[in-house]
Each structure stands twice: as structure tokens, then as C-alpha cells.
Amino acid sequence: MKTIAWAVGGVALGIVYVLLVGILGIQIIGARAGAVFDLNNELVAVTSPSVPVLQMIASALLSGLVFYVVTIGLQKRTARIRVSTVAGFVVAVTSLVIWSFVIAPDAVPLGGASTEGIAIGWEGWIQEGGVNPAVHVLIVLVLGAHWPFWSTPSTKTHLARTESVSKGNGSEPKQS
């Protein structure tokens, strides 16, 4: 039951991460173009174009924080919790990335700007968050950070040992 809760936590973290990166991405696009968008992605003001330093720093800090939580923050947890949390996070983020490509406008002109603009509300956040390279890189980094754990031959033994200890019998599983 505990591992399911941690997996759901990983899914929730992945969803929140993609949505926040999408919001920040929309704000970055707006600042560079001289537009101010509200949280519903509607244009509320026109200003002079600027470099969105604060939004870019916030995006980098957010990615770093999420990487820390999903990797270093889980080191003292059991193997099952680490695997379930990371799996939930990666599945959620990958699903939203795929969804962002599915709901993206069909044709984008050579200039790279869609004639349809940014979708309203959370759909726009998913579109922008899902195509943001920081999200793609974080998926690779999280999987890479946990790769040594998954690729070792003792992973099944370690998972079995963790399960037997958590059930209370404390006995070591037989090595095969």
C-alpha cells in the first residue's frame, strides 16, 4: 500500500512539474515577444520585449528541485519506494509529453509560430510544458541516475529482501 502511495506521489510530481514548466514557458514566450499573459494564457497587456531572466531562473530551479527530489531525495527510501516513485514520475511526464504532441496544432509554418497561438488554460500549459526540452532532459537524467540500480544483477534480490523485511519475517531470500 505504501508503494502505491509513493507511485501516486511520483505521478502527481510529474504532472505538477510539466504544468509549471508550461506556465513558465508561456511567460517566457510572452516576455520575449512583448506580451503579458495571465494564468489562463490570455493576452492582458503589451509591453516592450525583454529577456525573461526571472522566469528562466525559476524554470531552472524547478527542474533542479524536481531532479533532487526524484533522485537524491529518495536515496534513504526502500528500493520498492524508489522504483515506484520514479516509475510514476517517468510515466506521468512521458504521457504528458506524448499528449502535448497529440494536442499540438497540426501544421506549423516554417517560421515556427503557430497561427492558432497558445491554447487556453491547462491545455496550453501541457502543450508548452510537453515540448520544453528541459522536461525531456529531466526524463533522461532521472532514468540515468537510477540506471545503475536497475542494471545490477542484485536488484531482484534487493527487492525481495526489502519485501521480506517489510513483511516482518526478517529472513534473507535465497540467492540463486
Image: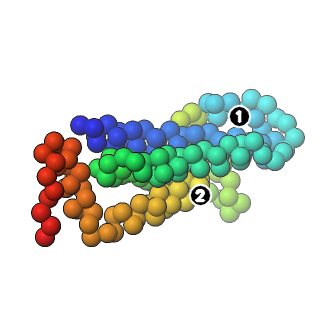
Under tag 2, what secondary structure? helix
Where is residue 168, by image quadrant? top left
Amino acid type, mark 1: Phe
Residue placed under numbered mark 2 in the picture: 133
Question: In the image, residue 166 lies at what x, y percent?
Answer: 21, 43
Question: In the image, residue 58 lies at what x, y percent?
Answer: 68, 43
Q: Residue at x 46, y 64 (%)?
A: 144
Query: Mark 1: few, some, or many residues within 10 Å (few <14, many ≥20)?
Result: some
Residue 10 placement, left or right of 112: left
Q: Which mark is residue 141?
A: none
Q: Residue at x 36, y 63 (%)?
A: 149
Q: Residue at x 29, y 50 (%)?
A: 80
Residue 12 placement, left or right of 46: left
Task: Say whether residue 110 is visible.
Answer: yes
Q: Residue at x 32, y 37 (%)?
A: 5
Amino acid type, mark 2: Pro
Under tag 1, what secondary structure? strand
Residue 109 placement, left or right of 161: right
Question: In the image, residue 85 lies at what x, y percent?
Answer: 37, 47
